[in-house]
Image (cartoon, grey):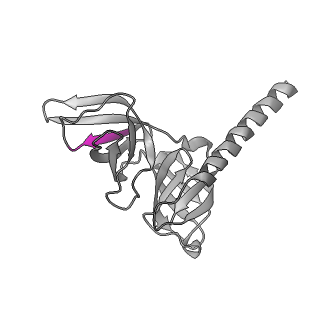
Amino acid sequence: RVAALYNENVSRLTREIEALRSAMALPAPAGKTKLYAEIVGYFPQESMITVSSGASDGVWRGAAVVTGDGLVGVVSAVGPSTSEVTLMGSPSLVIGGMLDRNPPVAGLIRGYSPGDVRLQLANPRAPVQVGDRVFTSGFGIVPRGILIGRVVQVIFDEAFGRKEALILPSVEVGGLRQVVIFR
C-alpha cells in the first residue's frame, strides 16, 4: 500500500510540475505581462475560484486567467490582495470564440453549467466537426488564440436556425493549484 501511495503521489507531482513548466513557457499576448498566482479558494457551485493576486499586484477586472492547457476564466472582481475568477462554464461569462479552421469560424462562448460550455456560431451554415479545437477570438477583453477546448457535439436547432458546438474544456479546474493572469 505504501508503494502504491508513493507512486500515486509521484505521478500527481510529476503532472503538477509539467503543468507549471507549460505555464512558464506560455507566451504573453502582445501588450500583456504574466503574473503567477495560487488558487486559494474553489467554489464549484458558483463557478468561481479565488486567486492570491489582487489590485496591489496590478490585476484588473477582465484579465484572462490561464494555464499551459488553456483558458481557466476571467477575473470578475479584484480586491487588494486577492481576485475572484469566473470560470468557463459559468452562465455569467460570455466571450468571443472561434474554431481552428481556415477561414476561422466565429461565435460566442457561453457557459450553462461547469459541464456545459458551448460555442454559439454566428453563421448556422458554418462548418464544424467533432474534434475541432476552439480558441478565444480576441473580440472583447480576452486576448486572441487562447485554447478553450475541443468540440464534442454539434447541436443544430432547426426551429430557430441556430447551430452550437458543445465544448469539452481543455482545463480541469478541480486539480489546479496555480494559474497565470495576463495583465
Q: Residue at x 12, y 31 (%)?
A: 159
Question: Chief secondary structure of the magenta span?
Answer: strand
Residue 40, how many percent across, how many down? 63, 56
Nearest the viewer among 98 and 115 is 98
Residue 136, how many percent across, how many down? 38, 50
Q: Residue at x 62, y 60 (%)?
A: 37
Is residue 96 shown in magenta? no
Q: Is residue 89 above or below residue 140?
A: above
Nearest the viewer among 120 and 39 is 120
Residue 172, how many percent across, how many down? 54, 40
Q: Is residue 144 above or below residue 130?
A: below
Residue 147, how many percent across, how many down? 45, 45
Q: Residue at x 52, y 69 (%)?
A: 59
**Residue numbers of the magenta segment:** 117-122
In which quadrant will I find the N terminus? top right
Residue 150 sits in quarter: top left
Nearest the viewer among 102 and 11 is 102
Q: Residue at x 62, y 42 (%)?
A: 175
